[in-house]
Image (tube, rainbow, N blue to C red):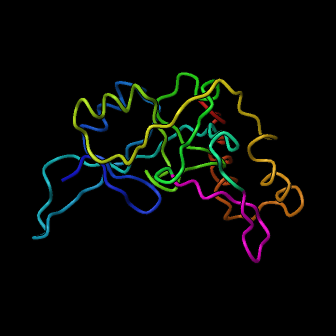
Amino acid sequence: MPDVFPMPGCNAVNQRFKDLVEEFEPGVHQFIPIELRNEAGDPLTENHYVFNCMVSVDTVLVKESGLQWEIDEPSGQSFLDILTFEHDMVLSRPAIGGRHLWQGLYLQPISSGGVFCSDAFQKELKKRKIRFLDQKHCAEGEVVWTPVDNIQPILDWEAEHGLHEGHRSWKRAQILKERGRLEL
């Protein structure tokens, strides 16, 4: 059984992964207990959780990563397919700060459950042989992340059309705002 495995929109993780996350960022992220069963229907003895990454901050440098904005038809909304297995991602070191696990608010990779991790966290994953948080090393640059340089097409569309109830970025921002932390 892998230590981390994808579920729709998130990752399920075991106790080893949870313990490592708590070493790096104690009390920051949510771990919702779930019961997994084997093929015979018997409960697995090891603890498993749905991992909810509670840090949202955009760090992807669009131009430096060679990403190109596309237009969704028929909505006309701009979007980026951030495929970490296809693109050499470049992240803003100043935007990352001292974080170890985070999701982008607007700019999220499609793989890895949308989670980025620090070099130090990724190194420890490998050292402990924790599998399979789908991570690819991303270069870090000293460029300061700004909305104008990285998400202006999205902001322009939102200014013209507003946000609809199901918009993931809007929902995530509202949840974080209600909890009193737009970012950690």
142 w.r.t. 17: above or below: above
71 w.r.t. 97: above or below: below
Whether 20 is among the magenta residues is: no
Whether 77 is among the magenta residues is: yes
Task: Indicate the position of residue 14 as horizontal and vertical percent values.
Answer: 26, 45
Task: Indicate the position of residue 30 as horizontal and vertical percent values.
Answer: 43, 41
Magenta stretch prevailing secondary structure: loop
| Magenta region, residue range | 69-83
**Foreground of the two, 142 or 112:** 142
Task: Indicate the position of residue 47 as horizontal and vertical percent values.
Answer: 22, 46
Q: Quadrant of residue 59?
A: top right
**Foreground of the two, 93 or 25:** 93
| x 50%, y 37%: residue | 138
The C terminus appears in which quarter of the rendering? top right
The answer to whether residue 159 is left or right of residue 11 is right
Task: Indicate the position of residue 107 as horizontal and vertical percent values.
Answer: 63, 48
The answer to whether residue 161 is left or right of residue 79 is right
| x 34%, y 24%: residue | 23
Task: Count all numbered tags in the image, as a single digit.
Answer: 0
Q: Quadrant of residue 58?
A: top right
52 w.r.t. 70: above or below: above
**Foreground of the two, 127 or 4:** 127
1 w.r.t. 94: above or below: below
